[in-house]
Amino acid sequence: MLVVPAQAYVGQGEGGATVVLWHFNEGAGDGTKDFSGHCNSGEITEAKWTDGKFGSGLYFEEKQVVGARDSKSFSLIPKANQVTLEAWVFPAKETKESLIIFKDKEYKLGLVENLVFFQICSKGEWQKPHVCEKKKLDTERWHHVSASFDGKVTKIFVDGCQNYESYEDTGKQITDSKSPFFVGGDGEGGYGWVGRIDEVRVLCRAHSAFNGGVVLNEVCWKDPSDGSQWIELHNHGGVDVNIRGWLFLDDEGNKLANFVEQDKIIRAGTWEVLYKIENLEAQDSIRAYDLDPDNDGSDVLVKPNYANLVDFVAWGEKVSSKEYNDGGDDAVRAGFWTAGEYVRVNTGAGDDDVYLKVDGNNDEAVEDWSTRGEPTPGAPTPDVSALVLFASGLVFILVYFVWRKTASQD
């Protein structure tokens, strides 16, 4: 499961840093409301309303955009010399170059042949574009893309994981161009986006880090060896992640683990086991919420809700969103499960643990989750195909030595 804060945008929750926040949830009309508090409402030019990642969204074809006039709030970005651009995107086809977010002579976020690129303008001159070549976006699929610059380092995130980092623009100052702001193109008919866009946000601060590399990897309600209960996290990304602000609850709202007021670093590529989990029942769901999305303690949310749910798993003979109180509803509203979809993970064997299949997908699908009776806390969950190959290798070696022994006797 990807750990991308699903619609976890609460206006000024970033300490007043949000400059534009368009949810595109109106579903009709020629305008969209800005939830940043800065009144940067958007004017829609020919883009069509459609299903978004959350609620409604907009479908764009070339020369179709959403625009906003320049305002004093946009000057907060060059004043701070920091920026974060992010959106959910659904490319309909691969294009040579298309824009997601654009402000002329300031910054741009887009795709070059489905590779995410980010660029800033300094002293009126566009700097060299940063192209994230590690991750190519699939067409006809939702992706979360984000890029940030803090005056020194440029970072690009794709589907919640940091895939690019550069210090090439260190010391560069973002230009205050006073130009209009656009989504879906440059406002003059060029570099038009083809596909859907939802949940656009611009901040005058660079994200310290996303929690995108961390997933609920394995959950054991009763370890056969000692009866202990634990939750295993895995950072499958390329950078260390601080899960400060994370809160783990069961479906009744009982706290299983709490890092709201303490740092907890999970190193890239490692597993972290949260032991001493108590009262975890076999029919419980596990929900991970991020109450401090920016990991700086400035915007800890008071109450968990679907907007800051970052991962979810449930198991039992019949676990559906409708049967799972607010736990299931949160998962549905955050986009993890589909309403009415059954999560068939446990077959009924009391000692089964729940784990994420090592299939490389982790695409928020029910089939990613399965069960196994031999939990492996703090270690990779064995890939069944790898075990089959290993066993086949042992059989081959045994047959070879028997053949050699027989041949030598002859």
Image (cartoon, helix red, strand yellow):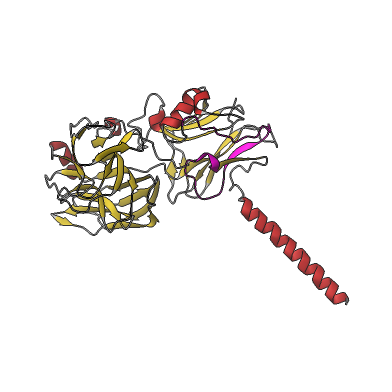
Q: Quadrant of residue 201?
A: top left
Relative to 183, is 171 above or below?
below
Residue for point 41% across, 26% down:
304
Farthest left residue in view: 178
Q: Nearer the viewer, residue 369 or 94?
A: 94
Q: Is residue 41 left or right of residue 91?
A: left
Q: Nearer the viewer, residue 346 or 405?
A: 346
Image spot of residue 369 (x, y percent): 56, 40
Image label count? 0
One can see residue 274 in this view: no
Image spot of residue 3 (x, y percent): 43, 40
Q: Is residue 137 left or right of residue 85?
A: right
Q: Nearer the viewer, residue 13 or 5?
A: 5
Image spot of residue 262 (x, y percent): 44, 33
Q: Quadrant of the C terminus?
A: bottom right
Residue 361 covered by magenta stretch? yes
Image spot of residue 118 (x, y percent): 27, 53
Relative to 242, is 408 above or below?
below
One can see residue 298 in this view: yes
Residue 226 covered by magenta stretch? no
Farthest right residue in view: 409
Q: Is residue 247 left or right of residue 316?
A: left
The majority secondary structure of the magenta stretch comes to: loop
Q: Is residue 59 left or right of residue 103?
A: right
Magenta segment: 339-368
